Image: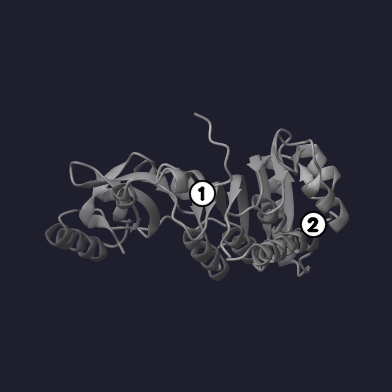
């Protein structure tokens, strides 16, 4: 099926509400991260939102790295 | 073994004090890992990737740059005296006009030297963001799509909607012509030209062409961009005033 329309895709095919709550932005060690909660009650890093390039060199801030729910700094 | 990182060499008393602190940390937080910030680097890097998100939150599977993330970061960069310059990396398909212009205005009004580099694509509202920096680069293969503002009717009434969109477009044109060497005539010509895009009006400008039109300053990669940024930082330290 091809839809020729100027309407944005997300208006035509709305995503499940729950999908929005799965990911959130938190601060860990003062660095903003986009994270999602894992089954083991940990945060898994989806995206590092820092502007400091040095933060991208550390393994513990890399996407896929996990840290406990309690370690959020703000 | 981990501990060693956090205990710098000092006098015995200091060592003991530190050790005690570590013990309290273990007791209170259940871990020895004291959150510590890595040192600030002089050049920070802001990535504008995916879609530029506006008032409507995009589903999480979309890669998006959210202005509520980017704007506080720009404010933090402006305030932090350790940061001397900002490199803006663009690979965006465009998105919300208001959000894009907000980011572009923030970058343009930053007092620190800024250099932008377009990798892959800097389409649509990515264009004002690319030109908002003090100096702009585009890679050989990167492209920028220039097209009129499109929106799914926000204002009630056809003439009003048209006028609203026209004014919005005028803001984009004015911003781009003010912050780059392209003339208004040329930019509008690219914006309204037919036959370049499939079933749409506008132009897809490739790297060297963008430089030729005066939209972008130079063709180059990361090395050139960082070299230019360091040059601008040096120049600013010597008391030179910034040019757009």
Q: Are marks 1 and 2 in contact (CB under 8 Å)?
A: no
Is label 1 on the same chain as label 2? no
Using a 10 Å C-alpha cutoff, classify the residue at mark 2 as few (fewer than 14 neighbours), some (14 to 19) or many (20 or more).
many
Numbered tag placed on residue B40 in the rendering: none
**Residue found at the very far left of the displayed protein:** B27
Q: Nearer the viewer, residue B161 or B239?
A: B161
Tell me if residue B224 can be seen: no
The chain letter for the residue carrying disc 1 is: A
Measure the alpha-carbon separation of dots 1 and 2: 28 Å
Picture quadrant of residue B84: bottom right
Tell me if residue B104 can be seen: yes
The residue pinned by badge 1 equals A53
x then y, percent, for residue B60:
39, 46
The chain letter for the residue carrying disc 2 is: B
Numbered tag placed on residue B180 in the rendering: 2
SS for callout 2:
loop
Side of B192 relative to B57 (left or right): right
Where the C terminus of chain A falls, by quadrant?
bottom left
x then y, percent, for residue B158:
65, 62
SS for callout 1:
helix
x then y, percent, for residue A26:
34, 57
Q: Residue at x 47, y 62 (%)?
A: B68
């Amino acid at each position: 099926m091809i839809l020729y329309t100027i309407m944005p895709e997300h208006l035509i095919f709305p995503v499940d509400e729950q999908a929005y709550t799965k990911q959130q932005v938190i601060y860990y060690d003062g660095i903003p991260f986009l994270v999602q909660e894992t089954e083991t009650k940990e945060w898994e890093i989806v995206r590092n939102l820092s502007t400091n390039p040095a933060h991208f060199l550390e393994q513990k801030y890399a996407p896929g790295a996990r840290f406990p729910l309690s370690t959020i700094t703000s | 073994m981990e501990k060693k990182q956090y205990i710098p060499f000092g006098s015995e008393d200091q060592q003991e004090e530190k050790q005690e602190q570590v013990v309290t940390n273990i007791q209170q937080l259940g871990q020895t890992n004291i959150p510590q910030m890595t040192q600030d680097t002089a050049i920070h890097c802001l990535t504008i990737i995916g879609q530029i998100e506006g008032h409507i939150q995009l589903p999480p599977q979309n890669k998006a740059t959210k202005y509520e993330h980017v704007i506080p970061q720009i404010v933090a960069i402006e305030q932090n005296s350790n940061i001397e310059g900002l490199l803006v990396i663009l690979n965006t398909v465009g998105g919300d006009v208001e959000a894009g212009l907000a980011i572009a205005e923030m970058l343009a009004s930053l007092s620190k030297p800024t250099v932008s580099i377009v990798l892959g694509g800097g389409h649509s509202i990515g264009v004002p963001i690319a030109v908002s920096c003090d100096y702009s680069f585009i890679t050989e293969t990167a492209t920028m799509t220039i097209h009129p503002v499109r929106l799914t009717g926000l204002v009630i009434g056809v003439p009003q909607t048209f006028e609203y969109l026209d004014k919005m477009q005028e803001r984009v044109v004015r911003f781009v012509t003010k912050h780059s060497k392209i003339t208004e005539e040329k930019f509008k010509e690219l914006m309204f030209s037919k036959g370049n895009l499939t079933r749409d009006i506008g132009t897809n400008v490739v790297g060297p062409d963008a430089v030729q039109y005066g939209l972008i300053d130079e063709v180059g990669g990361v090395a050139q961009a960082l070299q230019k940024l360091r040059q601008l930082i040096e120049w600013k330290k010597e008391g030179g005033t910034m040019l757009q």
